[in-house]
Image: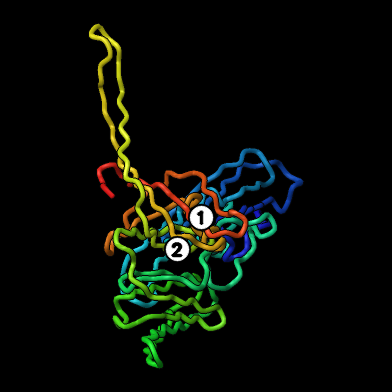
Amino acid sequence: MIQFTQLPENNAPLGGELRCIFELDDVSGEAEDHLLQLLDARTGNTLATRRYARCFGGSADIAPMLRPQACFTPAAGSTGFFDDEVRTVQIVVRADDARSDALLFLPVGGVSAQEAGKAVAPGLRTTMPLCRLISPVECEELTLFAEEPLRVTVTAHMGGERTESSSYLSTHGGWQLFRLNMNDLSEETVRVTVEAGEWGTVTYSVAPAPHGSRRLAWRSAAGSVEHYTFPFETVVAKQTVKERVYGAAGHEVVRITSERLVTLRSAFEREEVMEALAGIVSSSQAWLLCGEEYLPVDVVTSEVEINHHGTYDALEVAIRPTRKEVAL
């Protein structure tokens, strides 16, 4: 009989190693062939398979097999909790006839060797500072992780002593997503607080976005979708590549491909904001907000400077559409 001697903890991060080890409980006999399977606990579909030949057990880091299954597709909507369960991965590990309990893994990166395979700590999942700017027509996402359902209170401050508060209760514990849509609040709002009890409070100062600004969203190492409005679009460039052949008539162009690059510049920000914005460069997914649509973009920039010894600085990133037929 096969038994598991090591499995990752429930709610472990996908960004670190997820080691599974199984072995025969009786190694006095002959070595056997074994089949390791990762099954989607929600659908029952097989996500990955690995075979082991003539052995008494096996070991595998299943994280690389599971990371592509975590899918982020942010969308606009009204203020409140919303579900997007495909951001997490829930599986059953099967080795021959042995099956694990259902295991949930979270889309968290930047994991140290000591944290790999261990449960993620509850809390507000973000890389951005808790004091932020937002315009009267923009949206924002907050990601929270807690075993129990959460209550979030949104308070709009409208100058003087006037406030309006609304409370929202999630329907389940675990990985919980909350959306703030400023269009749902009063036009007189100058400050917004989003309180999640012991897990923290995010405060937004409300100000119109500069003319020509572009708002970018990206998947962060914390497992959240972060947002930032770049006030400046500094460069719009068109790159053209020509493929040529040399024949009897000399050089001839046989194919032309063009793509449009847009360079965005941030405001002059303090170091903690610059650190968070630098995550755009290393993010696997990013989106440009066009009205209420999240347009997938490819971040071309591969290196940014984030610290000039205590001074405020700006960051530039160049982006292009992920699909060539789409214009920014």
Residue 266 falls in image quadrant: bottom left
Q: Is residue 1 left or right of residue 71?
A: right
Q: Looking at this view, name the residue that lies furthest to the bottom.
A: 161
Is residue 105 visible in the rendered image? The answer is: no
Give yes or no for contact between labels 2 and 1 (Cβ–Cβ under 8 Å).
yes
Disc 2 versus disc 1: distance between alpha carbons? 10 Å
316 shown above or below 257: below
Is residue 40 visible in the rendered image? The answer is: yes
Residue toward you, 25 or 255? 255
Write the residue at 29% across / 81% down: 187
Amino acid bearing label 2:
Glu
The numbered mark, 2 or 1, whose residue comes first in the sequence reads 2
Residue toward you, 311 or 108? 311
Helix, strand or loop under label 1: helix
Q: Is the image coloured rainbow, by chain, by secondary structure, or in one colour?
A: rainbow
Amino acid bearing label 1:
Gly
* Image position, residue 7 (x, y; %): 64, 58
Write the residue at 39% across / 62% down: 229
Residue toward you, 81 or 288? 288
Q: Is residue 131 left or right of residue 190?
A: right
Q: Residues within 10 Å of mark 1 (few under 14, many from 20)?
A: some
Write the residue at 45% across / 54% down: 69
Q: Is residue 235 left or right of residue 63?
A: left
Q: Which residue is mark 2?
A: 226
Q: Which residue is mark 1?
A: 279
Q: Quadrant of the N terminus?
A: bottom right
